[in-house]
Amino acid sequence: MKTSKTLVGIAAAVALTLTTAACGNGGSDNASSNGDSKTLTYWASNQGTSIQNDKDVLKPELKKFEKKTGIKVNLEVIGWNDLQTRIQTAITSGQAPDVVNIGNTWAASLQATGAFLPFDSANMKAIGGKDKFVETALKTGGAPGKTYTSVPLYGLAYGLYYNKKMFADAGLKPPTSWQELVTDAKKLTNPKKDVHGLALAAGSYTENAHFAFINAAQDGGGWFDSKGQPTFTKAGNISGIKRYLDLMQTDKVAPTSNAQYDNGTKSVNDFANGKAAMVINQNNADNSIRSQGMKPNEYGVVPFPAPTGGQPVASHVAGINLSVFKNTDNKAGALKFVKFMTSKDVQKTLDKPYSALPVLKDGKVTFTSKAKEAKTFQKIYNTMSKPLPLVANEDQFESTVGKAMNKMFAQIATGKSITKSDIKQALSTAQQQVAASSAG
């Protein structure tokens, strides 16, 4: 790990959430380095059932890397509610790790800071070449036309998980349209038994931002124009968000307590414990579902359905990428580590506990033995997913729109009615925040 004044100078481009820090000198006069050719600091995102679970999964692989290269990796696993802020703080403060996991939707925003090592032809060659990656996954490495500053590590896609017994008992088949989804969810909801048709991570701004994007895409919406300017108040964005909010507000198929669920694990646990008949989650939910005692043959997965006549968008191209901080003291070691983590053997090992989809062209699905589930998620990932906006302000879209939805869900939970006009006003405010940040 290395501290550097160089990164501090880059901080002006960092996201809205750290405006205060970025406006200060952000200086790091203690630009000391504790890195060398024999150590690396790696920030991993929370992919498993807990932080400790991630450490248990990763440490054996890091030991293999150390044995192979002589380089010790100091691991820190960071939860999703904190990771984006920690990365931004690392950029502004200069206290950065060598290698970091990023949500691939942040790639263009973080690329714009200039704080990360470009995977130019030499660096790409050092990690095994670009041709080893699935093209769809590699394209999430940064803005179109620019040299990637991240490479894919784990592939993910959203799917609609359903409880087979609850559906069979109600005489239902898994839904293929939004209308069927709501109708089925209503039949499966019984508040007296504390059972609902759906569980939502309605207090998670990242989850809410993802569903704002997916539902808006189904309605023909869009969040940025061709020049990268925000277009948050488009009709499709408003109608898509309204439809999603209505699951709790008017359809009443998700409990109001879900407004406090600040991560996807809580809604997945409700599903696994029979409190919800369905949950919409990325394929890494398999791990959490099984950890709660639900057996693989007790649930099925289908694509997240669109309204009749809507666009068949079931997910964004989700996943985790790896980036190297440009000011690392150990560039050669960091590239060796990226090559190791994206090698066939390590990918095969980690995809199973993390329920990840392959990002390598010759990769096989290992997280499930259910051929139908594997086929469903690969179909969603390869043909029914749309990339989130690959623009510098994408992280601000997630932060401002996702948090606006958090607030609206919280208002619904306290009895307030949210109208399209309310949504438009909230999106207008979010758009102004993003525009002001860009102008600043």
Image: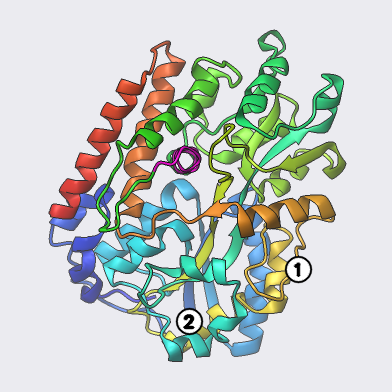
The image position of residue 350, as x and y in percent, is: 69, 65
> Quick check: 138 above or below 230?
below
- Label 2, label 1: how far apart the Cα atoms are: 26 Å
| Residue at figure coordinates x 34%, y 27% from the top left | 423
Q: Give the range drawn in magenta.
A: 211-221
| Residue at figure coordinates x 28%, y 72% from the top left | 114
Q: In this view, does 173 lie to the left or right of 118?
A: right
Foreground pick, 416 / 91: 416
Which secondary structure dominates the residues rendered in magenta?
helix
Front tag of 2 and 1: 1
Amino acid found under the numbered disc labelled 2 = Ala
Foreground pick, 307 / 264: 307
Determine the image quadrant of residue 304.
top right
| Residue at figure coordinates x 33%, y 59% from the top left | 391
> Quick check: 210 above or below 189?
below
Residue 219 within the magenta-colored segment of the rendering: yes
Q: Is residue 95 visible?
A: no
Amino acid found under the numbered disc labelled 1 = Lys
In this figure, which residue is indicated by the disc labeled 2? 334
